[in-house]
Image (cartoon, rainbow, N blue to C red):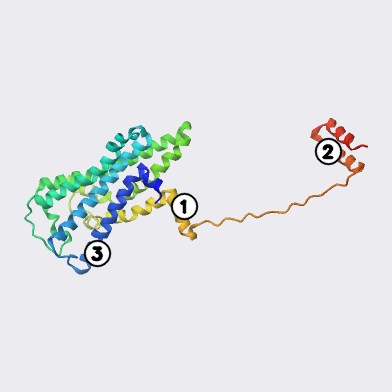
Amino acid sequence: MDRALRNALHNHVIIAMVFVGLILQCIDVTALTYIWRTGTVLVSTRAFCFTWAIIHDIGFVGIVNLMAWASIERHILIFHQKWVGTKTKRLFLHYLPLVICMMCPGVFYITMLFIVPCSVTMDFTKVHCGYYACLSVNPSVALYNTIVNYLIAPFIIVIFSVALIIRVLASKCRARQRIQWRNYSKMAIPLLSISFLYIVLYCPPIFLTTAYLAGLPQNIATSYYSDSNYFGYCAITFTPIMCALSLPELRTKLKICFPCCRRCRAAVGPQSLMMTRTKAGPAAGLTAGRTADPTAGPAAAIATIALKLP
């Protein structure tokens, strides 16, 4: 990636999401594929099960938290750029929230799975070795985990993404901000495309969980709910693709790397022009006088004939 793209503030949260998603794809997806194929975990040890559960929980919740913060931060970067105009402001309003988005779920899950005693026995034939059952033993902890780590962030993504669309379209309608509209679109389109991906793939099971907590019978949409819990992996997989399609700089590089994506343009070559010369002499002068531009006036025609006479 170009250095200018890496240094742009609006790309930092997307880079963090892609990096965390890469870790999930390499470890979590590999372990899930292995246990679905063989019926046992990849490495039957307590350390591996703990690491697998921690990476899954922190990674998924962290990515959703980063997406929620990106939905909020994009309003600041587009409409309130002065808030991140200095190094101190960038530290507290840009870099520190990125750390908090990953640190909060890390502290919570490490405390609940490692520090707090858990009486659940490990089962090497279950996903995450049954570690996730430690969170459901205590009802208050399970409710806190569901509301704080899984419900708040999706609602923030939906609300602030819709608000961003409305504000950007309102700014486009203003005659004085036509030039700024291009800058707004460059920062808004990548985020909105990724937000749409998470709203479609990640949010439905979260909203269904909320409905179950509100009193919806558990037998409604049971098969869809069990399958939709894995839609989040699709959102993580397609995030780099959406970034590449929404950034014009990356699209240009893709066209360079893949010549088949280039558009065929008609070649423009030199063309020969035919020029005719008139014979010199009084006749040529009279001819020139007769063929003079009529819009030049009679004075110009008389002056031309006078110069040709001996």
Q: Residue furthest right?
A: 310
From the image, tell me which residue sits under label 3.
Answer: 33
Res 91 → quadrant: top left
Labels 2, 3: front one: 2
Residue at 33% across / 41% down in the picture? 161
Marks 1 and 2 in Cβ contact (< 8 Å): no
Residue at 88% across / 47% down in the picture? 279
Secondary-structure class at tag 1? helix
Camera-nearest residue between 87 and 189: 87
The amino acid type, in three-letter code, at marker 1 is Thr
From the image, tell me which residue sits under label 1.
Answer: 252
3D distance between C-alphas at marks 3 and 1: 35 Å
Residue 202 drawn at (x, y percent): 28, 51
Residue at 37% across / 34% down in the picture? 79
Residue 175 drawn at (x, y percent): 48, 32
Near mark 2 (Cα within 10 A), the count class, few <14, some 14-19 or many ≥20, is some
From the image, tell me which residue sits under label 2.
Answer: 292
Residue 272 drawn at (x, y percent): 72, 54
Asked whether, in this view, residue 218 is left or right of residue 305, the answer is left
Labels 3, 1: front one: 1
Q: Is residue 146 visible?
A: yes
3D distance between C-alphas at marks 1 and 2: 53 Å
Secondary-structure class at tag 3? helix
Secondary-structure class at tag 2? loop
3D distance between C-alphas at marks 2 and 3: 87 Å
The amino acid type, in three-letter code, at marker 3 is Thr
Q: Quadrant of the C terminus?
A: top right
Res 74 → quadrant: top left
Relative vertical location of residue 73 with respect to residue 230 in this rendering, above or below: above
Q: Is residue 210 visible?
A: no
Near mark 1 (Cα within 10 A), the count class, few <14, some 14-19 or many ≥20, is some
Marks 3 and 1 in Cβ contact (< 8 Å): no
